Image (cartoon, rainbow, N blue to C red):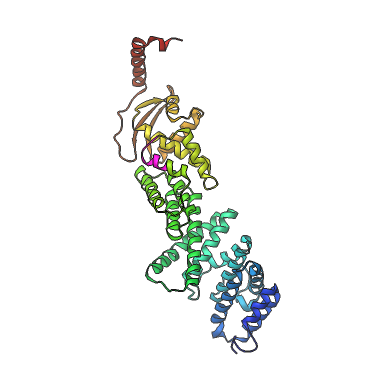
Amino acid sequence: MSAGSSSFSWVAVDAAVVRGDANGAAAAVLDGLRAVDFDQRKAFFSQLSSVLLRQSRATETANCAAEAGKILWGMPEVRHTQSFASDVTGEALLLAAAVGAAYAAAGNLDQAVTYDAEVLRSSVFFTYDGFSPLDRLACVARVLEASRVSGNARLADVAMQRGMSDYHSLAHLSRHNNSGDEEAQRHRDAVVHSYLLERGLYRQDRQDYLLAVQSFLALYDSSGDVAALHRAALCALCTRAGEAERLALLRAVLQRYATATAALPLPLHHHILRVCDGHLLTPADMEDLLTAAGAYLPTHVLHNALREHNILLLAHTLECVHWQSLLAHMGEQDMTESELHDLLVSMVQGQRLGVAIHHDTGFIEFACDNSGAAAHAPITDADALNRIAAAAAAISKAHPELLRC
């Protein structure tokens, strides 16, 4: 008996969902499933997935579609499995993904990730031919979002590993195939944009700012969303790769800004230009940038990145400097010696700068940075004290009043 016979109608399922009758919709689906031959199950589940996904796109029916799918998920005829925690079959994979999408559309990410995790961990995730790369990427994007909200880092790691190949597959297809189906294209774009945003946020959360910038730039290139360009700019400022790489990322942001239909916040654009031109950032500059960061980025992360920018510039001109003098050059008089020490140590560990810290005298000696700039000659504590004594003698001779207490 065919699922399309007179005893079963998908219209009846749609009508039940529209009425808010999840039980009625599930019962109608189950009657139809029991009537189909085994070799028709794949087509039946494909149609069921389409119905649930269509209803999930409307706010007023998304929750009922999810609840109907949840009822079906618990029935042995549907899942062909012994328990909820067991692996899903190919057909049930379609149902679980549709239920996850419906719950996500209804704003219930906790429920959505329950079903999407089943899909993600399935042994047939990549092999079931009824589940397209777009379906898989949509599932990955929802898991990344739910994991970010709930703080489930382990599940997010699994999603990242599973999503990369599907994203690149879709990117390749989009370059070589334009179907002309506007609705399908809008759906594909929505899935890809959601994935790129979540991938960028995943990288940003792990302070992998280089890859975060790449994701946000790809999102901007695909969607034109200026918020993605904003995120890319802030992450580029925080990138702890070599200075050449960081400046290349910032220039990539500026290049896109030049053709953007919507402008970056003026302070952000202005100060990125200053960074690219090799200017020191003043406290007022930093305050502008921290304000521009808003809720996009933790302010302490950006603040330290901006401080590192100033230190790298000063390291090119200063051989040896007392820590208090260095902070004065940076305009960071409120920064403590301990905070400066921790920042310098992190820069050394990140291979951004070579530093010798003389704790007994408070002097800091800069060596070369990771861009290959020539190192200053090593300076011992005795050298530093001799230079100070010579400078004091010269000042005493030319301007003795400066040394009077």
Residue toward you, 379 or 325:
325
Please state the extent of the stretch shown in magenta in the rendering. 271-279
Q: Is residue 352 magenta?
A: no
Residue toward you, 116 or 212:
212
Provide residue 157's location: percent of width, then percent of height: 50, 57
Determine whether, in the image, residue 196 is placed left or right of residue 93. Answer: left
Identified at 42% across, 58% down, the residue is 221
Compared to residue 264, the image places residue 362 above or below, namely: above
Q: Is residue 272 magenta?
A: yes
Residue toward you, 9 or 114:
9
Q: Main secondary structure of the magenta part?
A: helix
Compared to residue 183, the image places residue 276 above or below, namely: above
Count of numbered labels shown in the rendering = 0
Identified at 59% across, 86% down, the residue is 4
Task: Locate residue 400: give its quadrant.
Answer: top left
Task: Locate residue 241: give its quadrant.
Answer: top left
Provide residue 376's location: percent of width, then percent of height: 31, 30
Query: In the picture, which quadrant includes the N terminus?
Result: bottom right
Provide residue 18's location: percent of width, then percent of height: 67, 74
Provide residue 196's location: percent of width, then percent of height: 47, 58
Identified at 63% across, 79% down, the residue is 77
Determine whether, in the image, residue 249 is placed left or right of residue 25. Answer: left
Compared to residue 273, the image places residue 83 above or below, namely: below
